[in-house]
Amino acid sequence: MSPSSICINTQTPLVQFLDPGAAATANGTRDGVDLSSLREGIDYRFSPGGVTRMVYPLVRRLLERGVLTEVHWVALNPRAPPVARAGAITLHNVRLDAGRLAGYGEMKEALWSRIHDLEPERPHDDLFWSEAFSEYAFYNRRTAELIRQLDAAHDFDAFYVHDFQQLPVGQMLETLKPKVFRWHIPFDLDPIPPPWRSVLAGYLDSYDAVVVSAAAYARSLAALAPTRKVIRLYPYVDPAEYSRPGPAAVEAACERFGLATGDDVALLVGRMDPVKGQDLAISALSTIAAEYPRLRLVLVGNGSFSGSGSGLGLSKSAAWRARLEEMVRALGLTERVVFTGHVSQSDLDCLYERARFTLLPSVREGFGLVAVESWLHGKPAIITRRAGIAELVHDRENALLFDPSEPGSLAEQMRRLMDDGAGELVARLVRHGRSTSRKCSLAAAERAERAMLEELMEA
């Protein structure tokens, strides 16, 4: 593959600006504000989630290898300067006023909810003919127009569009150059209303290839858009980014979060969202709390970009956390459940190190990279059968599986790991889990994504 230039498009930006004033006054060039002139954690932060964990490391690796020579990254970022620089990557930020953001947010949340089958009683049949859809379309049109302007200036070799919020962009680009779309969330035809299907199929048909995270999603997508090239690529992380902190650092972090030396920690890492199943974990803890008086549940995470003050400012995450806190009080678990909110990577490493096991209890999950993180930290994981990563799991070999629709299923798997005789099981889960994590490594992704781009560009 000859060196190439590429334009990436995501909803969630790589960087969220915590202090827009600092960005406005920072030393900039014609290429925009340079992040190296700002303070991470004070002026800006990298967005939590897959954009930072997946897309960014891969782009950096391909730039280092000389596979990519130029990368421009377009994202929704209402509180950011128009252009910023993150090393060799140029970030272009799309802005919308508050009124348009509200309509866009309503539309994309309705899409999210229906595709995850969270509100089956609301058919949403007329969603694509609503006022909110006009704002969603406006945002995608503005994004596509910016990408076309950038293409006129930089002559990209390919476009890589990520996730359902950006789905119409491919149709709006009106170019014959290769376009790849990566669908990160679950894809199951059953919850999708029949009136939506032709609309979604039309958008998907505008791409040269569609990437999904699990074989089941690939089958569903192929049934919806049979003329499209569908590729299954596992999400990935860079193992080099995960450290094993020393005892002193772990003790200091645990003290900050109120964890005592003798506590057994069940760790759940995920944004505050009903789809993540934190309520199932709290309920399971309630079931076994009397049996294991030192077991504590630690919930790490805050809102997504959509719910953050530096993002779209939607209230979903705050409302869900309030509901969970009320649930904890009602069950008498106030001293047994810890809400950490967003934590730094170093603190997260410490919490993984301290955990006895980890939980991925989502009611639906596009993949579940936190399970890979657990394996990299040498911890056994309990994983929902409704996650894409479940297709890589052999129950009681590399993880424990449970069905979130079966009462008591999660609590029973937690008992297995808490029992005194669990040592052999834990050792096996850790050993095989670490081996499985190699399928979701940056090295594996680099080979697969490079091959895909090479095939599309040579077609």
Image (cartoon, rainbow, N blue to C red):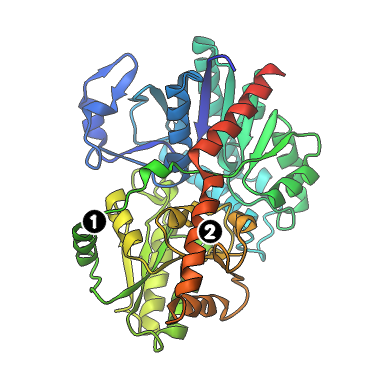
Task: Compare residues 214 and 221 and report the one nearer the observer.
Answer: 214
* 332 lies above or below 126: below
Percent x, y of residue 254: 24, 65
Q: Which residue is mark 1?
A: 246
- Kind of residue at disc 1: Gly
Task: Compare residues 17 and 422 and report the one nearer the observer.
Answer: 422
Residue 432, which numbered label?
A: 2
Q: Is residue 32 left or right of residue 6?
A: left
* 87 lies above or below 202: above
Percent x, y of residue 297: 37, 72
Circle 2 — which element? helix
* Residue at position x 21%, y 35% in the image: 39
**Residue 11 shows up from this direction:** no
The image quadrant that residue 43 belongs to is: top left
**Residue 68 shows up from this direction:** yes
Q: Earlier in the sequence, mark 2 or mark 1?
A: 1
Percent x, y of residue 339: 33, 66
Task: Compare residues 414 and 136 and report the one nearer the observer.
Answer: 414
The image quadrant that residue 57 belongs to is: top left
Give the Cα separation between the discs numbered 2 and 1. Answer: 24 Å
Q: Where, quadrant-wise, is the C terminus in this rendering?
A: top right
